């Protein structure tokens, strides 16, 4: 789809995808907190959120910036096309 609309539109799609991925990266920190709290026997909704707080204070400004979103776009593009290559080799 992105090739049919040209390079500029394809770049826009990937940059938008990178921004989306970067904006949702907080979920990884939240998952780490949830797993740790579950293993410690805390009921859902309780326990500390140290990873999420660290992410919000230190990492979020870097990851959600334009360079961070562009990096997320590049990593997503590499991940997507590596899966495509792997699928072609398997078939």
Image: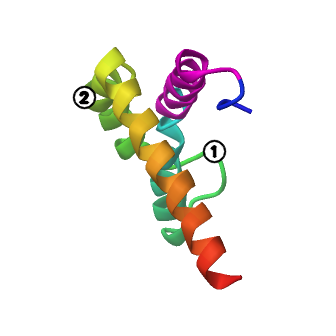
Query: Does residue 22 appear left or right of residue 83 in this picture?
Result: left
Q: Residue at x 67, y 30 (%)?
A: 2
Please give the residue where the numbered disc 2 appears in the rendered image. Answer: 58
Residue 91 in the image, given as x and y percentages of width and height: 71, 82
| Residue contact at pointers 2 and 1, CB within 8 angstroms | no
> Toward the viewer: 88 or 32?
88
Query: Does residue 33 appear left or right of residue 62 in this picture?
Result: right
Q: Is residue 40 above or below residue 14?
A: below
What is the span of residues highlighted in magenta in the rendered image? Answer: 5-22
Secondary structure found at label 1: loop
> Toward the viewer: 83 or 31?
83
> Toward the viewer: 39 or 57?
57
Q: Quadrant of the N terminus?
A: top right
Residue 6 seen anywhere in this rendered image of the structure? yes
Residue 52 in the image, given as x and y percentages of width and height: 41, 38
Please give the residue where the numbered disc 1 appears in the rendered image. Answer: 45
Q: Hey, which quadrant is residue 9 in on the image? A: top right
């Amino acid at each position: 789809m992105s090739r049919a609309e040209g390079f500029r539109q394809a770049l826009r799609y990937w940059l938008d995808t990178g921004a989306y991925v970067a904006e949702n990266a907080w979920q990884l920190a939240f998952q780490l907190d949830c797993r740790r709290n579950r293993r410690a026997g805390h009921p859902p909704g309780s326990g500390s959120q140290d990873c999420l707080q660290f992410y919000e204070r230190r990492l979020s400004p870097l990851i959600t910036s334009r360079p961070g979103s562009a990096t997320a776009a590049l990593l997503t593009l590499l991940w997507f096309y590596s899966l495509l290559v792997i699928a072609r080799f398997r078939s």
